[in-house]
Every structure is written in structure tokens, then in C-alpha cells.
Image: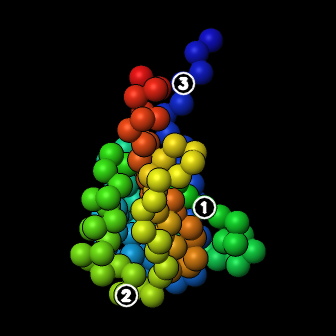
């Protein structure tokens, strides 16, 4: 018996589906397909489904994590694209974390927290 996994995708809630779709495209995700209820986004090997559904209690504890190669480049791109001002969202600058990542926090227009980060070099070398 062989149990092989292909992909796991989260269903990310959206308070305003159209605004959230624009936000993720401006963030650099490709909109692969969309219906009135669901949109499939991809960036390289990462993907998620944005749903036209919102419950505040659910969002209060919903978080996403995106591991990238160069977190400071992602931060700079968000600044260059004016994501925070354009969408009225919150972002915190990158910092080295005690759990071995350099990351930053970005909240989407619905309040979903994204932690975008990369392994710290010394942590990455230890794992190799």
C-alpha cells in the first residue's frame, strides 16, 4: 500500500469576495479559476481556495503560513505595490523569530493573518 499526497489547500474566507480576489492578485498570486463562490489561487507550488463566505468567529482564529525563499524581497514588493494603503490592511515588518524563521505578518482585507517567512540561515544550515 502506498499513501501519496498531492496537495493540501486551505479554504480562506472572504468578507468582500471581489476585494479579496484583487488583493491576492496584487500580492502576486495567480487567479487560476473563479466562480461566484470560490476562487483558486496559486503562486509557484503554493495554492489556496478563496471562498465567498465569512464568519467573524472563524476568521479570528484563521491563519495562513507562506514559506518563501527571500522574505525581505516579499516585504519590499508589498511596500512597492502599496498593498497596506490600497487595501487598508495591517502589516508588521520582518523580524527574526525564536522559532527559526525570519517572517512578517500581513492581514488580508477580511482579517486573515498571513505569516510570510523564510528559515533563518543558521537554522537552515543545521537542518541540512
At 48% from the left edge and 47% from the top edge, which residue is drawn?
101
Q: Which mark is residue 85?
A: 2
Q: Which quadrant is the C terminus positioned in?
A: top left
Please identify the quarter of the rendering in which residue 31 is found.
Answer: bottom left
At 33% from the left edge and 46% from the top edge, which residue is drawn?
69
Q: Say above or below: 18 vs 123.
A: below
On screen, residue 3 versus residue 88, left or right, reads right
Q: Give the residue pinned by disc 3.
A: 4
Extreme-top residue of the structure: 1
At 70% from the left edge and 77% from the top edge, which residue is drawn?
55
Mark 2 is surrounded, within 10 Å at the Cα level, by few (under 14), some (14 to 19) or many (20 or more) other residues, namely few
Mark 3 is surrounded, within 10 Å at the Cα level, by few (under 14), some (14 to 19) or many (20 or more) other residues, namely few
Q: Earlier in the sequence, mark 1 or mark 2?
A: 1
Q: Give the residue pinned by disc 1.
A: 63
| Label 1 to label 2: alpha-carbon separation | 21 Å
Nearer the observer, 55 or 36: 55
Nearer the observer, 95 or 111: 95
Q: Quick check: can you spot residue 85?
A: yes
Q: Earlier in the sequence, mark 3 or mark 1?
A: 3
Q: Say above or below: 45 vs 89.
A: above
Of badges 3 and 2, nearer the viewer stands 2
Q: Quick check: can you spot residue 36?
A: no
Amino acid at each position: 500500500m502506498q499513501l501519496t499526497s498531492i496537495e493540501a489547500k486551505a479554504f480562506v474566507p472572504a468578507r468582500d469576495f471581489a476585494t479579496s480576489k484583487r488583493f491576492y492578485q496584487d500580492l502576486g498570486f495567480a487567479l487560476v479559476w473563479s466562480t461566484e463562490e470560490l476562487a483558486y489561487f496559486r503562486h509557484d507550488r503554493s495554492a489556496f481556495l478563496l471562498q465567498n463566505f465569512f464568519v467573524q468567529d472563524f476568521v479570528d482564529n484563521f491563519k495562513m503560513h507562506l514559506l518563501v525563499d527571500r522574505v525581505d524581497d516579499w516585504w519590499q514588493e508589498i511596500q512597492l505595490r502599496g498593498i497596506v494603503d490600497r487595501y487598508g490592511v495591517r502589516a508588521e515588518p520582518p523580524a527574526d523569530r525564536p522559532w527559526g524563521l525570519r517572517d512578517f505578518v500581513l492581514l488580508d482585507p477580511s482579517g486573515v493573518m498571513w505569516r510570510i517567512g523564510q528559515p533563518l540561515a543558521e537554522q537552515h544550515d543545521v537542518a541540512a
